[in-house]
Amino acid sequence: MGLIYVGIRVTDLERSVKFYTGALGLKERKRGKMSHGGLWVGLIDPVTSVSLELNWYPPDSPFHSPYTPGEGLDHIGFEVPDAKATIRAVIAAGGELAVAPWLEDGRYWIGFVKDPDGNWLEIQGLATATPAAPKT
Amino acid sequence: MGLIYVGIRVTDLERSVKFYTGALGLKERKRGKMSHGGLWVGLIDPVTSVSLELNWYPPDSPFHSPYTPGEGLDHIGFEVPDAKATIRAVIAAGGELAVAPWLEDGRYWIGFVKDPDGNWLEIQGLATATPAAPKT
């Protein structure tokens, strides 16, 4: 009861399901059809139990509109064991580098990649988890 | 480890903190400053433990850009005891009605309101929790 999930809009539902369940490790939990024809897929992180919903609207839906990422969604945050390795894997899976990883406070590697629709994902991981990382 | 939160962008940080910690019941958990001058506030739902981050960028930030809600963020989902009462409370607190509540499958009242920046919030609640609700 309360805040239960955040839903993002995607332009190719299966592409996005594959993207988020790939290198980022989310699992598909449920999917459904909206009364006006839109489709949604509920994803969940099996470790943190945090949910992300993917929403897709057909061209004739009253909720369909030209897709621009916009400013409402700032980013989706992931903490992973090896940030730089995950960023490489996400790019290999169709993501795009937005901000190359930097060492924050000497403790975290943080970088940003974009999902297939251009939405920003923050990928962070403890620096101690990547002993081979170059010093900056 | 994994998906830990979703962050939205806001244009007035304190207005949004007040909005989300008001009728929607989130609590401020931590806040900080980004190295380039942006500010963030981490909110958490004390019941579901789901997090929402608010991000604000000053005009001279490299990440500042004209604000349009866009299509990346579809909506933020809340389940509440009485959807129609919460929708009224959210509107009274500065929200705007986007889609008036309807009875879905005879089981849930679902409606959409916009936050002060125009981002959509889904407010849903079991119909049995609102015995005085008119039949549709």
Image: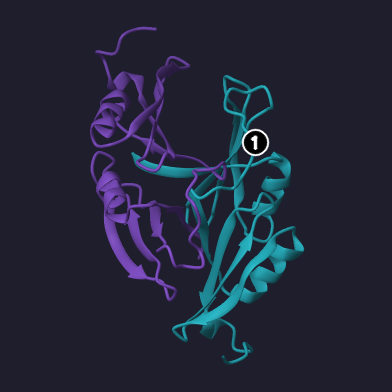
Chain colours: A purple, B cyan
Query: Residue B65: where, in percent of width, then height?
Result: 62, 32
**Residue B89 vertical placement versus B34 (above, below):** below
- The residue sitting at the top extreme is A135
Relative to residue A76, is residue B90 drawn left or right? right
Instruction: For residue A40, say whether it is visible.
Output: yes
| Quadrant of the rendering where the C terminus of chain A is positioned | top left
Mark 1 Cα shell of 10 Å, populated few (<14), some (14-19), many (≥20): few
Query: Residue B119: where, in percent of width, then height?
Result: 60, 53
**Residue A102 vertical placement versus A16 (above, below):** above
Relative to residue B124, is residue B2 drawn left or right? left
Residue in the image at 45% along x and 44% along y: B5
Instruction: For residue B82, say whether it is visible.
Output: no
> Tag count in the figure?
1
**Residue B10 vertical placement versus A86 (above, below):** below
Give SS at disc 1.
loop
Residue B97: quarter of image: bottom right
Three-letter code, disc 1: Pro
Query: Residue B73: where, in percent of width, then height?
Result: 50, 50
Residue under pointer 1: B66
Relative to residue B33, is residue A5 drawn left or right? left
Residue B61: quarter of image: top right
